[in-house]
Amino acid sequence: AQSVTQLGSHVSVSEGALVLLRCNYSSSVPPYLFWYVQYPNQGLQLLLKYTSAATLVKGINGFEAEFKKSETSFHLTKPSAHMSDAAEYFCAVTTDTGRRALTFGSGTRLQVQP
Amino acid sequence: GAVVSQHPSWVICKSGTSVKIECRSLDFQATTMFWYRQFPKQSLMLMATSNEGSKATYEQGVEKDKFLINHASLTLSTLTVTSAHPEDSSFYICSARRGLNTEAFFGQGTRLTVV
């Protein structure tokens, strides 16, 4: 079985500041890891994914994440926060290439202060 | 990119009635679709995995007779909430995976309110 833990249910940053959202995973086999963003009353949009290729993954909207096996982490970062980044962010894991569902973390709400 | 369309976006129904939610993959064939439930300010919890042409696999604690899932074609899965009660009020989200691709594409969700 696999799981993800997102540290910090709420993160608040100032506009222009660094964004760091933490995600640690647990998996007995090599994982596939994802970050999704959710705006109110909407579905999920994929930000980026790790699929055992490069450990530093670049996504949309300036986000990136680094897979660190030794730390079982997949933290999401963005150098400079924008007001439009305010949303709920979910880290997710799966160990299957196609047929298994994603297991989601509890989510982190990002607030961006002007 | 791949698009998953969910309909309706929101629905209000009376207690005791049934509601059907559709999930369509618009530009790809989805052999597997997933149904999630999300309570306010909480994460997504997997309800069931739906495979085309076969019975859905439900997660522990999910009543299969209450949440009927049908995956009749490679582009359509439906979730029917039968005899809905106020505690069924939630945000329901479907997702679909395109064969061996690891990415899951999500519908926009359906807000169900049972009054």
Image: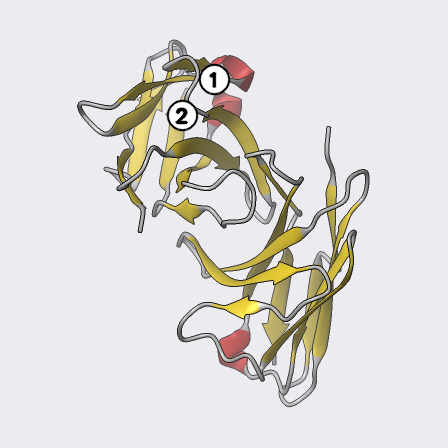
Answer yes or no: do the residues labelled 2 and 1 have beta carbons within 8 Å?
A: yes
For residue B31, side relative to residue A46 (left or right): right
Name the residue that disc number 1 marks. Answer: A82
In the depicted structure, whether residue B50 falls above or below residue B97: below
Displayed quadrant of residue A107: top left
| Residue A21 in view of the camera | no
In the depicted structure, whether residue B51 falls above or below residue A75: below
Secondary structure of the residue carrying tag 1 is loop
For residue B14, side relative to residue A6 (left or right): right
x and y percentages locating residue A54 in the rendered image: 41, 12
Labels 2, 1: one chain = yes
**Chain containing the residue with disc 2:** A
x and y percentages locating residue B13 in the rendered image: 69, 78
What residue lies at 41% left-to-right and 19% top-to-bottom?
A114
Q: Nearer the viewer, residue A91 or B41?
A: A91
What residue lies at 49% left-to-right and 12% top-to-bottom?
A62
Displayed quadrant of residue B64: bottom right
Name the residue that disc number 2 marks. Answer: A112
Secondary structure of the residue carrying tag 2 is strand
- Callout 2: 10 Å neighbours few (<14), some, many (20+)? many
